[in-house]
Amino acid sequence: MNDRVDTPNPVIRLADYCPPTWAVEHVELDFDLGIDRTELEATLRLRRHAPGPLRLNGEGLELLEATLDGRPLTAADYTLTDSTLEIPLENDTAVLRTRVALRPAENTAFEGLYLSGSRDSGFLLTQCEAEGFRHITFFPDRPDVQSTYTVTLRADKARFPVLLAGGNPDGEGDLDGGRHWARFVDPHPKPSYLFALVAGRLERISHDYTTADGRAVALHIWAEADVIDRCDYAMDSLIRSMRWDEETYGRNYDLDVFHVVATHDFNMGAMENKGLNIFNAKYLLADFDSSTDDEYRHVEAVVAHEYFHNWSGNRVTCRDWFQLSLKEGLTVFREQSFSADMNSAPLKRIEDVALLRRAQFPEDAGPLSHPVRPSEYSEINNFYTATVYEKGSELVRMLAGKLGKEGFRRGMDLYFKRHDGQAATIEDFLSALGDANDTDLTPYLAWYGQAGTPRLSVTGQYDADARRYTLHMRQRTPAGAGQIEKVALPIPVKLALFGKDGTMLPLRLEDDVQAHGTERTVVIDSAESRVVFHDVDAVPVPSLLRGFSAPVILEFDYAPDELAVLLRHDVDGFNRWEAGQQLAGLAYDDLRDGHQESAAVSAWTQALAALFADSSIDDALLAELLTPPGEIELVERQPERDPERIRATRVQLLTALAQRIGASALRARYDALRARTSNTLDAASQAARQLKRRVLDLLALVDAGAAQQLAQDQFAQAPGMTDRLAALSTLGHSDIAAAAPLLGTFRERYADNALALDKWYSLQAQLPGDGALERVMALEGDATFTLRNPNRVQSLIGTFARANPTGFHRTDGAAYRWLADRLVALDALNPQVAARVATAFNGWKRLEPVRREAAHAVVAGLAARTDLSRDLTDILGRVALG
Ligand code: ZN
């Protein structure tokens, strides 16, 4: 159980880091597993590093006995608090043995050892990152203490036929009384957060894999019997990930077995425990009938992410939790590169940047803003953020871009070689990359220490007489996160120039004797700088920050027709999409401000109508181009936010687009795409499904009757979940009453499929407008709803609070009060999940006055409570600052 706090949370500071006093060279763990009660004997072989007592973390543990070097300890020999065990030690080595009792079935926080599923049929598992191991045994629970592990599991054989722990198998056998045992040895020293065990009734699928360096590895994916036939795609993804890491980074797997386990009860996405990855079932199971194309891609990406951690995270781990992005930012970057190689690279980039803008930019613009490497925290669980993960990946991407493909590989080779087996820092990472390339990368350290999204303001100036074009660039990072003064950052700007006819111009920059190439990257590293282009015959259209070469907000005062040029002609797939997003933003502003004759609206709709008719464009890219920024991104375009108005304006914008393309063209395209309906996952089929969905949504705006009928038919005939869910969503948004029977059908069809039911909840949670809260409250009464399952909570409560702006931000504040009640109830069960959901209140201060006041009252009321967990208290305390 998490401790409740009534004093302010202590703050942990990076500046206070001290190396551990004691090392643990080897750990032996002996478990007697049971659902109600588990006993664990831990033997720690200790070696002194520095003077001082032995201080171990331990929370919620019932200490049964302790011996030191074989001698029993009495209460007088140590100091035990609710979070530490301190033993004064004279010698430089010692062997400490403790026996504790745990109560897995009572652990609703899913941190430490807990039960997934029911008492009768569920299984036991552990989650230790970041500080869960201290809920299992007394230990210096910090990532710079690395040990080899020998783990023995004992349990009733009928109830727990499968026993797993990380490492290589080292024997198993039967015991008296229907019990059995299994032992595992992990030869690679690891921090305690990577320990894991699993015990229960599980099925498996297996594959024999041989690494590039010749090691035979048994791959096993484990799941409960009813879902084991949905694990094949994960196995394929795992095999692809392993090959890719061998080919791209020269990294081989390093144990004889690799286990992956699916659970429905998990706080986060998945966990990279050494040799025993544990996954939220949502990111492991997939089948065509119940998973969407997006979900297949997520499975592929998360399987890869956790596997890649075996090097970026496990072999080289973090010195302390401030360095979290050392493993997470790097691993997200590796995962994104892998997905780009497996699928379409430009589409992957669009998806990644869209996520960054939707999740990280708002986080970095308010009171939860923090640097990629925070300098302090009160609860580390709350720093598994979009900033640490997504912005952290962008920083690695900038470094990789600067060093080039071969240089980056050289740098990564040195990083892995130099720090293998160590707990490293961000500085170590930059030094290794730099040393391998004779480059000083320390200027990039500022990106890790400085919060906030930098703004890059660019103006263009054309001198016809001199045939010269000058870009003036100014960067500034807004004050925030306790940092007033911000330094200038190195910002790589990849750029090109286009003629008005859409051709790319050859580039001659200041130092060039003659023009060469059509694309260049310039690194802007001072507050103001300029880039001069020679031999330019007419005012060009600059394509800036191509491929989103740096995580900044670019400001350039484009005219609508200039953006239209890029939208039609830019060969950089990302910037082409970006031009469309910018243009849609201008069009949105005009509609919001009541300008009926908007040049931006006609430029945007005209360019897209032309692309719609152009058969050479990829279906998936077209679908992305036809999607303007979402309500959450549009929120940034006004100081005082009114979600109703944002939504209405966006619908107006989409309607203008649908009208320009025309109902008959939309209908014809829909029919053509429907004729290609398939039940396969190839890129072309996925793209067709994605475009079909966009087209149907647009058609619903200009011919609702026809679109609703098509949606009904599509729902009835869909060969898989992508088409089925899309039809339901279109219909739900268009006519909720007409969708009701179909929702009923869906509910019945998937009554035994938790992940499909989650989609049923989240779809309904997203339906906008009046009545949304009442709908969500009615769904809370469904027999399958429970606050005890994080996926269920996220799909209903999380989705409503984060992805239904008009529903959540009702002017009367009823949804705010409702969420506050749910957070309190949820916090008593699972603080980590409560804290995540509570971030939905972030940004309340920038709402229009009526909503702002209502939200503030609720947030302030919650923040004033003294009976909440450290996790939730931390988030509320910061969010309340506004
Ligand atoms: Zn990760």
Image (cartoon, rainbow, N blue to C red):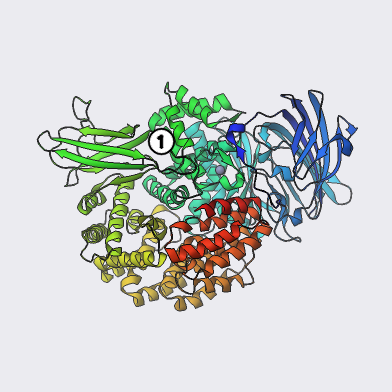
Q: Amino acid at mark 1?
A: Met
Q: Position of residue 134 (x, y in %)?
A: 72, 42
Tell me the residue at 64%/39% (across/down): 274
Residue 720 in view = no
Find disc 1 in the rendering and name its residue: 398
Task: Find numbered disc 1 in the image and state the secondary structure of the residue it sits on.
Answer: helix
* Residue 587 appears in the rendering: yes
On the rendered structure, is 389 left or right of 259? left
- Using residue 165 as the reference point, say whether residue 94 is left or right of it: right
Q: How many marks?
A: 1
User: Does residue 665 lie above or below 338 as drawn?
Assistant: below
- Give the percent coordinates (x, y) of residue 683: 40, 53
Residue depicted at x 63% and y 56%: 228
Q: Residue furthest left?
A: 465
Measured from the top left, where is residue 262 in percent x and y?
63, 52
Residue 675 sits above or below residue 454 on the image: below
Percent x, y of residue 484: 44, 40
